[in-house]
Amino acid sequence: MKADRGETDGGEEALRILVADDEAATREMLKQFLEAKGYEVTAVEDGRAAMEAADRQRFSAVILDIHMPRMGGLDALKAIRERNKRVPIVMLTALTDRSLAEMAIGMGANDFLNKPFDLEALEKNLMVKILMDNLS
Amino acid sequence: MDDAVVPLVAHDLQNPLTSIRGYIQMTVMLGEQTLPPDLKRSLSMALISCDQLSRMVVSLSLLSQLEEGTYKLCLEETRPADVARGAVQASQAFADAQGKGIVERFEPVAEAVRVDVLLLDQALRNVIANGLARIRSKEKITVGVRTMEGMVEIGVEDGGPAIPEDLGLKMLATESQTEVKEAGFKTDRALGLVLFARSVAAMDGQVGVDSHGGRTSFWMRFPVVAGRAEAA
């Protein structure tokens, strides 16, 4: 079975998060923030790379932007959900893309956050969902 | 610019805003123990400016969609005090940074109104920002929710400059902004106020501006959903 935790410098297990966003600045910012918070992060630039990463490795949670080239967030959501029914998936979207966000929830996303989002809110959101997934 | 392009431009502006806001917030959070207080305050102000800009971008996008008729209205029964409370919370940091206050005066309103929560939230945030801009530091605005004759009123009251009766509604219309400016009022909140009026109209509500006795109120009213008052 693939593990969804890596190991930190201190020997403790770190939760693995998959981030997919085609905007390099946003992707790098999320990676830096989550790593500073102790997560192990795999950051990719489109939905296809996210799907491939999810095939190779198990993650504690997935963050997907909706608008991405090659394979968008909704298609990646569908593909990842087909492989893993439980992993918490949070979609990133613009506030005015409400119909897409609702569609994502209908397709199995656990939540969505509007850009620009509060980093503390994102982390709390992730932690709650990971905890709930572990308890279920 | 073609009106149809505005939502696209607004949408594209959200991406750089996301990373700018994120990097600033990350610097503040990770430097909590090490950053000099002045720098922390400067970064907090930059964060608030990002949120302000984001609210304007969203307003621009929503206004454009409403004018184009492409906005998909999503009406749902909602307790207005809940939306008002959320809008006040979202505006608190902005008020604090300017040394201004927001007072909540919510009657125990149990009645539901039928509104698009996203539009109502944005409209109210814009009116709160307008109220804060109209007062001086150390002053407060009041955000109120009350029932009256089958309607629920959500209003933002401030002690800023009195507005002549014939000018109030003109502040909420794009085409009257020159007249508003010539009357000596600032028009830098026009986008937010126009969105406020358009949003409320789209939800079949009413808007108004009352100014007397040193207090000015920008308000919106929505009919109570039939049968809900008794149930509550």
Image: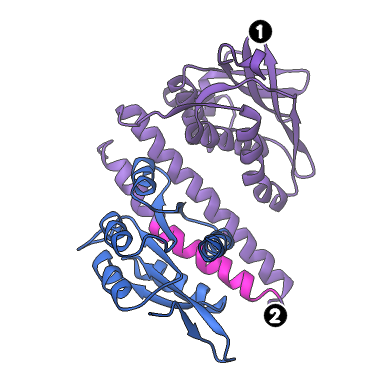
Chain colours: A blue, B purple
Asked if residue A92 shows in the view, the reply is yes
Q: Please name the residue shown 51% across and 20% down the image.
A: B170
Pick the residue in front: B167 or A105: A105
Q: Where is residue A128 in the image (x, y as percent from the top left)?
A: 57, 60
Residue B48, above or below B123: below
Q: What's under tag 1, amino acid-wise?
A: Glu
* Magenta segment boundaries in residue numbering: B15-32
Horizontal side of B108 relative to B196 (left or right) equals right
Q: Quadrant where the C terminus of chain B lies?
A: top right
Q: Please name the residue shown 25% across and 37% down the image.
A: B2
Which quadrant would residue B215 be assigned to in this image? Answer: top right
Disc 2 from disc 1: Cα separation: 56 Å
Residue B58 lies in the magenta stretch: no
**Residue B34 marker:** 2
- Give the foreground label among 2 and 1: 1
In the picture of the structure, the residue carrying the numbered disc 1 is B149
Residue B28 lies in the magenta stretch: yes
Chain letter of the residue carrying label 1: B
Chain letter of the residue carrying label 2: B
Q: Where is residue A52 in the image (x, y as percent from the top left)?
A: 26, 73
**Is tag 2's residue or tag 1's residue first in the polypeptide sequence?**
2
